[in-house]
Amino acid sequence: MIPVSGGFAVLTEPVPRSHQHNQLVISQPVSATNLIAEAERVLGGAGLTHRGMTLVGDQLAGTACDLAEMGWQVEALVNMTTHPRVAGIGLADVVSSVVEEVDIEVARPFWDANWRRELPGVDDEVVAQLTDRFLLEAAVVDIRCLVVRDAGSVVAACLLKIDGRSATLDAVDTHPDHRRRGHGDALVTAALAIAASEGCDAVELDADADDWPRRWYGRRGFVEVGRLWAATRP
């Protein structure tokens, strides 16, 4: 972690191609011009080819707009949270033959295929690092990998990252050929049941402010608690 204007930068040497793990995280008001300079200083100084940052909070809405006007790709997100109560549902009821808790490596082929589908032309090094980063996180955070299989193959997966009494729900996805069958519901229900069993007070996630997951999670008890923007230089 390196201090920068308005926040800090994080660099993760083993996975330099992961934008999530090599970026600026900004929470205090600062100009777009200053942030671009800081990205060049820190990310460029580390030899990274990408430039990225996350702006957290309404106070940075103007900066996000300025970055967009300066040619950056800016994605508006909402942070959502829920209390992981699963009334009347036991852990064994949801982590069963439908949802399995497995080793992260079991889901690697599923994620690899997803990245290649979503990022045409992506190289093998990037694909490998996008899963390797989860293994790095597992060294410091309690990560539970949940999957749904069909004919032995993983067709849906998510990660529950538990840190003390809070948790993050991440990488929730279903193969396009297996959607609208309740797999997402099963994964989220299982994740919340596990969080509740571990004594977590809250489970949080980030969702696209302008897409359907925001409403989907809202119907499942998640409420919006903040705004943020992910900005990358094309």
Image: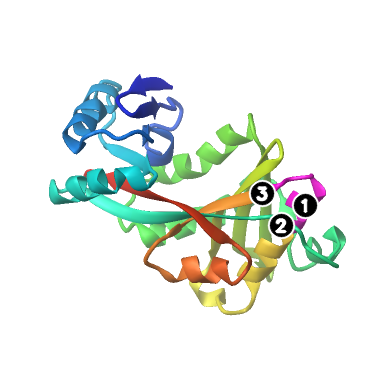
* Res 234 seen here: no
- From which residue to which does the magenta span run? 191-202
- Measured in 3D between alpha carbons, the distance from the residue under mark 1 to the one under mark 2, in whole angstroms, is 6 Å
Give the label, 2 or 3, closer to the camera.
3
Q: Are marks 1 and 2 in contact (CB under 8 Å)?
A: yes
Q: Residue at label 2?
A: 192
Mark identifier at residue 227 = none
Q: Residue at label 3?
A: 202
Q: Residue at x 20, y 29 (%)?
A: 34
Q: Which amino acid type is shown beneath numbered disc 1?
A: Ala
Give left or right: position of 133 versus 56: right
Vertical position of residue 86 compared to residue 67: above or below: below
SS for callout 1 = helix
- Measured in 3D between alpha carbons, the distance from the residue under mark 2 to the one under mark 3, in whole angstroms, is 9 Å
SS for callout 2 = helix
Give left or right: position of 18 versus 193: left
SS for callout 3 = strand
Vertical position of residue 218 compared to residue 64: above or below: below
Q: Which amino acid type is shown beneath numbered disc 2?
A: Leu
Q: Residue at label 1?
A: 196
Q: Where is residue 99 in the image (x, y as percent from the top left)?
A: 73, 63
